Each structure stands twice: as C-alpha cells, then as structure tokens.
Amino acid sequence: MTFAILPADAGPVRVVVVGAGPMGRAWLRTIVADDTVELAGIADLAVEVAGDAAAEAGVPGLATGPDAVELVRRTGAHAVIDVTVPAAHHPVTLAALRAGIPVLGEKPAAATVAEALSLAAAAELTGQLFMVSQSRRYDDHLYAARALAAGLGRAGILSVDFFKAPRFGGFRDAMASPLLLDMAIHQFDMARFLLRADPVSVLCDEYNPAWSWYAGDAAATAAFEFEGGTRFVFTGSWCSPGLETSWNGSWRLSAERGSVLWDGDNPPTMDAVGDGVATAVQVAAPGAGIAGSLREFVTALRTGAEPMGRVHENILSLAMVEAAMLSARTGRRGAIDEILDTSLATALAAERDGGVRAVMAGWGSARAGLKLGGR
C-alpha cells in the first residue's frame, strides 16, 4: 500500500510535536539537532508547558496551542509527531490522519490492539503514513547481531534478560502491567527484528515483587513460540536494583550452527561451528534511537520507501504484549491470532467512521489486513 509523499521542493520536513513532557522534550532536542527537519510548533493541553518546552529546546516564540491539527494548519507544517501518553495516541493520531497529515508516533501504536487496528485502517483510508517509533531497533549492535544470526542457520532459542529499577513517578507507577505494556514491547519488537519472523503464541507469568514501588505487576517471564517453532523467552523486572542490565536487555541466540551473545550495549559476539559463517560484520542502523526513527520517517515521506515500524508491521509487537497479559491473567497459552481477531471484532463494534469500518471489514481477518496493508 502506497502513501502520500512530500513534493520534491518541500524543503525541510516541518513538524508539530504533540506532548511536551519529558519524552516530548527528548524529541524536541532530536528535531532541533536534525537539519532535515524543522520544528514548526508544539501542541499540549497545558499550553504554558509547551511554551516552556520550546524555550528549553532553544526555540522561544515557537507556535504553541492545545490542538495539533490546528497548529499544522496555522504553521503549514507537513507532519505530526505524537509523544502523548498511550491513552491519547488513538484520538491524536486519528485526528491528524483524517486531516490528511502523516504521523510518527511513540510506541505503543495505541493503548490497545483494537485501537491500533482502527488507526491502520484510517491510514489506509486517508493514504497517509502512520509510523510507530520502536526506537530500540535503531542500534548498530542490534543490526550486527541480526546479521551474525543470519549466518547461523535455523534459530532455536532467543532469550533476553531485562533487569532495571527505575523510579519514574507518574502514569507508569499506576499502570496495571507497567513492565509488559510500557517496556517489554521494545524487547518483543526487537525479537521480531532479530528472528525475521512473527509470533504464534505465548505462555506468560506476571507478578509483582513484595518490595515493588509499582501498583501493577512489574516483573514477568514470557515464553513465545514463533513461526517455524523458534522460541523466544523474555525474563524481566522493573524493580530489580543492583547489577542492572542494559536498557536493551542482555541477549542470547542459539541456532543450529552456533550462538550469538549481545549485552545490549557493546558489539555482539558469536561462536560458530562449521564453515561459511561470517565472524565480523559492518552494519549500521539508519540512525540511533529516536533520531533513527525520525530519519526513516523523513526518508519515507520524501521517497515513499517502506519504513520499519509502519503501523501495519508494528501491530504484531503490541499483540505480543496483549497476548502475554491475557496468558498471565488466564494461566493458559495465548494465541496471537486470538488477540488479533478479538481486537478486530472490538474495533469494528466501536468504530464510528463508516469509511474506516469498511476498510477493516474488507480485511477478512486482522492478520490478512496487516499483511495486505503493509505491502
């Protein structure tokens, strides 16, 4: 599926950032540092906070207001970058897409898979790009690990340990499943990237250590089956002080002709058997972290090239989260297609836009729609 691209003479891609909290300010710094992008405005319901963020970013007097679409129209911006809390992703992104504005959004695509499917259909209907920033894919060492793994034959087991002890305050402390919903989606998405495959099912145990400062479960072990029978095991905690892992996690891939280790921060290492296996690779991501997401979004808007993280491709990472949460609640293995199909039914029942509903109804199944729309 194609999407609208900018005219060749459009100049720097002018963007409006929605959300002036800590993550929004990180995006502002990234945008200001990139000469292919121009910051046109900041939208936040607290307009004074938007003004403070603009001054902090070194752009005092920038256009601000509570409504992103209005700011785009006022400033002539080309795109929206949505850095709101997950619950706001659906209304903010939907309003932009309906107004003919492409969107780069922070993960997750939406608060639920059902809402994400609605946004995928809206992107199809409007012909606008909606890309989700899975920023931890943009890492040279991850790309190198993927290249090394490609030379080892069939993958058997991929595992990651993630142990951190952040004290965020705010909405994460009150979430029902803070680790799975707000963080593990990164590792789940990285697993899809490393394995070049998609998940089939998961068995998950979620819990909260007695000393946890989170209201919801902040620790989990999730064992996924992927296409072809490969297993991916995530073990993590957000309340594990001492000897903490990288924010990327600590990884091990076991394949038929050897193994790859990656500590999440340094170049990966490999131990291979047999001949014809590369022992060193020179691979570069298209940028680091959110700067990489921004660069790929800009390239897509200029050339029409399919970006990583386009909503149709990204939804399966969010489905992994919901399937893990369902498995933890029910104590049984959760199928990814069960999540997708239930979510599609929910999205169809809730959708008020007839055009968006018609797109979803035409998919036949959620998985078919994601494959069709992501081509």
Image (tube, rainbow, N blue to C red):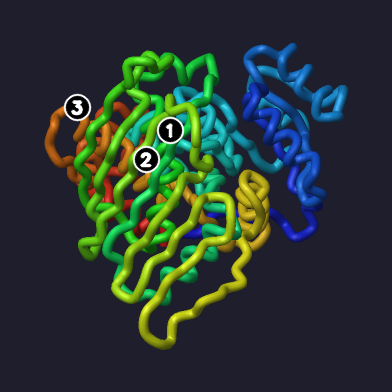
Label 3 vs 1, first from the N-terminus: 1
Amino acid identity at mark 1: Ala
Residue 257 at x, y = what percent?
33, 76
Asked if residue 128 is positioned above or below residue 149 in the image, the reply reads: above
Q: Of tags 1 and 2, which is closer to the observer?
A: 2
Q: Which residue is mark 3?
A: 329
Identify the secondary structure beneath mark 3: helix
Label 1 vs 2, first from the N-terminus: 1
Label 3 vs 2, first from the N-terminus: 2
Disc 1 + disc 2, Cβ < 8 Å: yes
Q: Which residue is mark 1?
A: 110
**Badge number at residue 318:** 2
Amino acid identity at mark 3: Arg
Split into 4 quadrants, where in the image is the N terminus?
A: bottom left
- Observer able to see residue 125: no
Q: Quadrant of residue 266?
A: bottom right
